[in-house]
Image (cartoon, grey):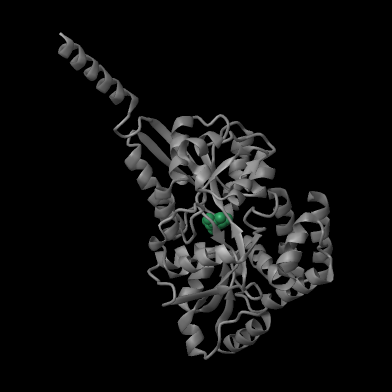
Amino acid sequence: MKKILILLLTAIFAISLLFMGVGCKEKVSGEVEVFSWWTAGGEAEGLQAMIDIFNEKYPDVEFINATVAGGAGVEAKPVLISRLTGGDPPDSFQVHAGHELIDTWGVGDYLEPVNFIFEEEGWYDVYPEDMISILSKGDDILSVPVNIHRSNVLWYNKAVFEENGIEVPTTFDEFFAAADVLKAAGITPLAMGEAWTATHLFENVLLGVVGADDYVGLMDGSVKWDSDGVKEAIQTYVDILDYVNADNSALGWDEAAQYVIDGTAAMTVMGDWAEGYFKSKGLTPDVEFGYVPSPGTSGIFMALSDTFCLPKGAPNRDAAIAWLKICGSKEGQDAFNPIKGSIPSRTDADISLYDVYLKSAIDDFGSNIITPSIQHGAAVSETWLVAIGDVITLLLADKDVDAAAAALQAAADENL
Ligand code: GAL
């Protein structure tokens, strides 16, 4: 009798475990719509690597990969704004850590804090405090990071440099000297793309000319945007534009990077998602392409982080949480980042999975001065970024250094 009772209890326990989903794949069903702008080479494959893990773990959930093409989210962000303000949030969306997250979506009360996921998953032990602070509004953690990207990289075609007998530039003087040789040889020295990539180049030149301290001071108002240092940076930027492909406004960042692959251009200044792109085209770091910090920025790591969040009113909240658990996990990050061209935001990644460039980025992130990217949401709010972007677009056309400096200061006054 006692034996039968024990057997019965064991059976009931086993059946209830099965229903709770313990010991088997987690029981979440329905669908999950994840919104991002990762459609280019490298970024699309990186995202797919995380989706594959999701599909493996949650076979009953249909993954809706809701991408809106356009680098840096220039096309995706307006769509997102109208969806969120219209009460039609996706289940999760891509957003940059820092001011884009906190001052844009954080203030609008659009996001559910994800502290509970950090607790459940033990993430307080594997994410550095600095990382958690750029995800947080007060005590509320508003998003889950998947990576850290570096924005200040000059990528170059190694064969083009060798064939033209020039050294890879690390200063602006060296850049202009190399660019003159390349231009004379009929090669575009620097490939640039559409408007946001011009702002991306500008943040790099700004950092390279004014240095890390003043760059950071510009974001908190202690340094003026119409100071002599910034004017020198704007003038340097205007001078660089003489060495850029004429069709820039018609190209995405990846198409500009393709010019470097093809050898019609020698260099491009882009975040390290370009590394993901080069690799997606079959290239190997240090073989066909090389990389150095953009001119004047050695020892500085201009950082940004891609994250995914939990919008309030997400139609499939449980599945969204399941997705976020993959994004923040070691497994998810170690599958995503080596393909994406970014480094993990966790401290416990398997470094052996990362290539020579990414290993160097991991080292630099640990030893360099860290500055926040303007174009990619770390340093400024979305509103301020749009204002800076407008100034740069005008500058491309009129090359008026003083007017740009004044307009940048006005943008800071309005947003600080
Ligand atoms: C950045 C984003 C990167 C990469 C890039 C180009 O804003 O942080 O992950 O996707 O845009 O699309």
Q: Is residue 48 left or right of residue 168?
A: left
> Disc count in the image?
0
Asked whether, in this view, residue 258 is left or right of residue 171, the answer is: left
Rendered residue at 46%/64% (across/down): 277
- Residue lying at 38% horizontally and 42% vertically, measured from the top left: 54
Q: Is residue 136 above or below residue 239?
A: above
Ligand 1 image position (quadrant): bottom right
Residue 67, position in %: x, y? Answer: 49, 47
Q: Is residue 91 visible?
A: no
Q: Nearer the viewer, residue 96 or 68?
A: 96
Task: Kindly tell me whether residue 160 is visible in this rendering.
Answer: yes
Q: Quadrant of residue 166?
A: bottom right
Q: Residue at x 67, y 78 (%)?
A: 242
Furthest residue toward front: 2
Q: Residue at x 56, y 86 (%)?
A: 167
Q: Position of residue 261 (x, y in %)?
A: 46, 74
Instruction: Name the spot of residue 346 as percent of width and height, x first.
Output: 49, 52
The image quadrant of residue 172 is bottom right
Left or right position of 338 against 72 = left
Residue 334 in the image: above or below residue 283? above
* Residue 305 image position (x, y, % from top left): 57, 53
Q: Residue furthest bottom?
A: 165
Q: Nearer the viewer, residue 278 or 262?
A: 278
Please say if 17 is above or below 355.
above
